[in-house]
Amino acid sequence: MKHFFKGSVDTPLTSVDTMLQTQVKIMQNWSSSVDTRSSSVDTRDSSQKTQSTGSSSVDTGLSSVDTGSSSVDTGSSSVYTGSSSVDTRGLPRNPSGLIWDSVSTLDQVVSTLEAFPVTPQKI
């Protein structure tokens, strides 16, 4: 026995497509058709686009060069080497290269992971 109410529609449950089901279908289509890897999506303003030079790229708006290699001498610009940046603007030069006004402290580093040798104490 079917009950009919004023303003209602009698429809089998399997043929009703709710808004949530529609949204899930749309999202599945989006996620399977859009590649959002950082290497394939460029969201920068058109004035910041880079010019491709083979495997390297040059950003002419920021005076930086990303070549993927570990060392690049650009004279008066920044270099991105993958793990750090080197800013050579305004530093004095001599025939052997840059003149550094800083002191390396790498030889003063003491590892806390190694135990100091223990000498037996006399009683």
Image (cartoon, rainbow, N blue to C red):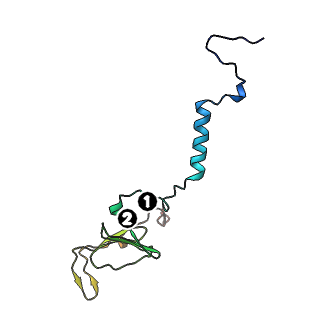
In the picture of the structure, the residue carrying the numbered disc 1 is 42
Q: Which mark is residue 4?
A: none
Earlier sequence position, callout 2 versus callout 1:
1
Using the numbered discs, state the Cα–Cα distance from disc 2 to disc 1 in whole angstroms: 8 Å
Q: Are marks 2 and 1 in contact (CB under 8 Å)?
A: yes
Most foreground residue, 55 or 82 = 55
Secondary structure under tag 1 reads loop
Point out residue 122 in the picture as x, y percentages from the top left corner: 48, 63
Q: Residue at x 21, y 79 (%)?
A: 92
The image quarter containing residue 49 is: bottom left
In the picture of the structure, the residue carrying the numbered disc 2 is 49
Q: Quadrant of the N terminus?
A: top right
Q: Amino acid at mark 1?
A: Asp
How packed is label 2: few (under 14 Cα within 10 Å), some, or many (20 or more)?
some
Most foreground residue, 78 or 31 = 31
Point out residue 16 in the picture as x, y percentages from the top left corner: 67, 28
Point out residue 25 in the picture as x, y percentages from the top left corner: 62, 40
- Locate residue 40 relative to residue 61 in the image: left or right: right
Secondary structure under tag 2 reads loop
Most foreground residue, 10 or 33 = 10
How packed is label 1: few (under 14 Cα within 10 Å), some, or many (20 or more)?
few
Q: Amino acid at mark 2?
A: Lys
Point out residue 48 in the picture as x, y percentages from the top left corner: 34, 63
